[in-house]
Amino acid sequence: MLAAGLLVAGWAAQQTPVTPAKPEEVLKPDEQARISVDVIGVNMLFTVTDKKGRFVTDLVKDDFELIENKKPQVIQQFSAETDLPLRLGILIDTSNSIRDRFKFEQEAASRFVSSVMQSHLDKGMVISFDSTAQLVSDLTIDPGVLAEAIHGLRPGGGTAMYDAIYFGCRDKLALDLPKSKYRRAIVILSDGEDNQSHYTRDQALEMAQRADTVVYTISTNVTRNDTDGDKVLKYFAEKTGGRAYFPFKVEDLEQSFENIHNELSHQYIILYRPEPLKTDGLFHTFELRVKNRKDLIVRVRPGYYAPKM
């Protein structure tokens, strides 16, 4: 069965489930090139903090060094990110496993979208996932529409988180080009326990990386035990340059969203063309660090997918 993309559905209308593809589906070479590396180079979003977690926002291009395959790379573009248009996906777990705290999560998520979308150029969407992934509100500049969509969600069913990440990145967030002109982020509110997806964890991660999307996760696990789902949430965050949050109390949810808001407001962006540029379709790692500043922490995804020509 061929994959069908996310169908546009208004929040007030019946939610439209995504039709999943077979897990072994492979992107065509031209699709790989479109959503992995722009013609002019690799685009990466990142934040810099000190060891106490405070953001460092006064750095310039010459403060950084970028290494790929043991070879220094030339940083061609560098800027702070607060003014670039944001493409934001709010992915909300509506499975039975999160029923107890769902109302509080809706309230916190609604306030978050209203605060983070400041520019008329910013766009957000809402995807819910239980047994299937559903586009509840398509990309819009109106945070009120997103908040109302969130409030209209009802819990029930299994958990298809990987499918939601995959389709949200491939069919929505990856479409605005050039990549260097937009920030892309996903915020996942879930316990991380996927049991319904057709795509695997690593396929979902690959699509997020190809779409240059930073993933932030907020766990709904309140047991204070480190579950397999929590490990999955950490995995997505670490591999995309985001961060995972674990609010054990309902009152801490608001702070988790506020922390993500702060992250999105203190980002840098770098654009570089790898030398030599490989077109093998494989994942290539790099290292980005601040010169002579071991006290500073750079949070960035570990690499990129090269196009396959």
Image (spheres, rainbow, N blue to C red):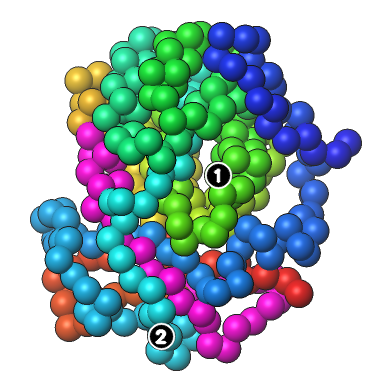
* Direction right: furthest residue: 1
Left or right? Give the position of 197 relative to 150: right
Mark sitting earlier along the chain (2/1): 2
Point out the image quarter for the N terminus.
Answer: top right
- Residue 290 magenta: no
The image position of residue 205, as x and y in percent, is: 56, 51
Which element carries disc 1, helix, strand or loop?
A: helix
Tag 2: amino acid: Val
Q: Which residues are magenta?
A: 258-285
Measured along the vertical axis of the image, is residue 185 above or below residue 193?
A: below
The image position of residue 228, as x and y in percent, is: 47, 38
Measured along the vertical axis of the image, is residue 241 above or below residue 243?
A: below
Residue 74 sits in which quadrant?
bottom left
* Residue 251 in view (yes/no): yes
Left or right? Give the position of 101 relative to 164: left
Tag 1: amino acid: Leu
Point out the image quarter for the C terminus.
Answer: bottom right
**Residue under the point 54% across and 23% down:** 137
The image position of residue 63, as x and y in percent, is: 22, 79
Left or right? Give the position of 21 relative to 139: right
- Residue 268 magenta: yes
**Residue under the point 36% across and 64% down:** 269
Crowding around mark 1 (Cα neighbors within 10 Å: few <14, some 14 to 19, many 20+) is many
Measured along the vertical axis of the image, is residue 48 above or below residue 106?
A: below
Q: Which residue is mark 1?
A: 173
Which element carries disc 2, helix, strand or loop?
A: loop
* Residue 155 in view (yes/no): no
| Disc 2 from disc 1: Cα separation | 27 Å
**Residue under the point 31% across and 25% down:** 114
Query: Which one is nearer the viewer's eye here, 197 or 105?
Result: 105
Q: Which residue is mark 2?
A: 74
The image position of residue 186, as x and y in percent, is: 45, 40
